Image (spheres, helix red, strand yellow):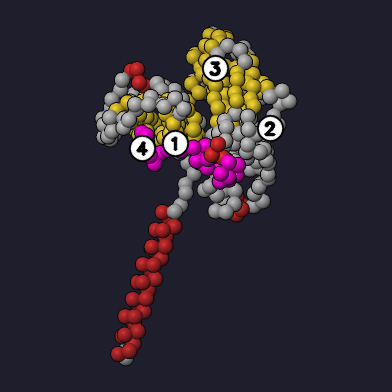
Amino acid sequence: MRPDGVLFGRQGRLRVALVALAALFVFQSADAQTRFMYLRGQSIHPAYEGWWPNDDGSFTLWFGYMNSNWEEEFDVPFGPDNYFALTEPGALNDIELDAIVPSQIDQGQPTHFYPRRNPFLFTIRVPSDFGTQELVWTLTTHGRKNRVYSSLRADYRMDPQVMSTEVGGSYGSLDDRLRTNLPPELDVEGDMHRSVRVGEPVRLVAVTHDPDNFPPRSERSRVPQSREQLYSPRGVGSVVVSGAPGLRLTWIVYHGPADLVTFEPEQRKAWMDSRAWANSPWSPPYILPEVPADNRWVADVTFQEPGAYVLRAVASDGSHFSYENVMVEVTP
């Protein structure tokens, strides 16, 4: 073999090795960016959304959660798998260290958890002297313990515009007027504590108003025309979820098993389901139900089994939220 033939063979092998190495990096990079869609089997991550000051000197802390599943729902009662703890900074940084105080466990968090992202779902008001303390929310699902640490650190301060951005409000608008956006006014008619028998319907009536009519109601259709468009990074399946602006109201099960509760009419989802035709404000096409002429949203609810339930009315303009709870004792 000619000497240059030997050199060519070595260079050829070198080129092959370099190509293989480059391909390995490409495949590893592609794998690292792959987004998997889990229907069930994953855990829930509690979320601290941020805080803002109140006129009386106190502070409001906002919380939500991320259920990594697209279908699986959870019922996690108050206790060692669903609790809050008030601590000094860093006291619960060790995930194995628990500090359960019975009077602190229930801070208004849910016990029923819907799929995917449920942002700005409840608030906790802390006093003006809260200082550097932390409120730590622990959730254990599928044997995995996840925690979120809430504090008054400056980088967690937010305002209604930040809230709107986080929920893709007004199609992801950054309109500066959102900084002073007012939440919907919400009033539930009737008793807030009710008793009913299994199978007997309970009528729920919620009255809502948007005090500033902002952001203005708008609808648009962005229904995917092909599978490629559905999963395009710039299409409906984009990682940036957006939602339609406009007043809406829906009822959710806040405490108690939701599969034993039936609403009539069926309620629009309060969780961020971005799949097409998913009956969600974040789902294309973005068509909201019309606001009733008298602003009274009426629904009938029935229960299949006895127990203590909490139903939550969620009013939103697409960027800001208001809530009211109705406690229902269901007897045999």
Does the magenta-highlighted stretch encompass residue 81?
A: no
Q: Magenta span covers which residues? A: 151-177
Residue that label 2 marks: 289
Q: In the rendered image, which residue does mark 4 sit on?
A: 153
Q: Are marks 4 and 1 in contact (CB under 8 Å)?
A: no
Q: Give the quarter of the image for residue 291.
A: top right
The N terminus lies in which quarter of the figure?
bottom left
Q: Nearer the viewer, residue 227 or 209?
A: 209
Mark 1 vs mark 3, CA separation in Å:
24 Å
* Vertical placement of residue 165 versus 305, above or below: below
The tag earlier along the polypeptide, 3 or 2, is 2
Label number found at residue 144 = none
**On residue 49, which mark appears?**
1
Q: Closer to us: mark 1 or mark 3? A: 1
Q: Earlier in the sequence, mark 1 or mark 3?
A: 1
Amino acid found under the numbered disc labelled 3: Val
Residue 305 seen in the current view: no
Q: Quadrant of residue 62?
A: top left
**Secondary element at image label 4:** loop
Secondary element type, mark 2: loop
Q: How far is disc 4 from disc 3 in space, using C-alphas?
A: 33 Å
Q: Dot 2, how many residues are within 10 Å of its Cα: few (below 14), some (14-19), or many (20+)?
A: few
Q: Earlier in the sequence, mark 4 or mark 3?
A: 4
Q: Nearer the viewer, residue 40 or 171?
A: 171
Q: What's the CA distance linking mark 4 and mark 1?
A: 12 Å
Give the labeled residue for mark 3: 326
Label 3 residue SS: strand
4 or 1: mark nearer the eye? 4
Image side of residue 105 versus residue 35, left or right: left
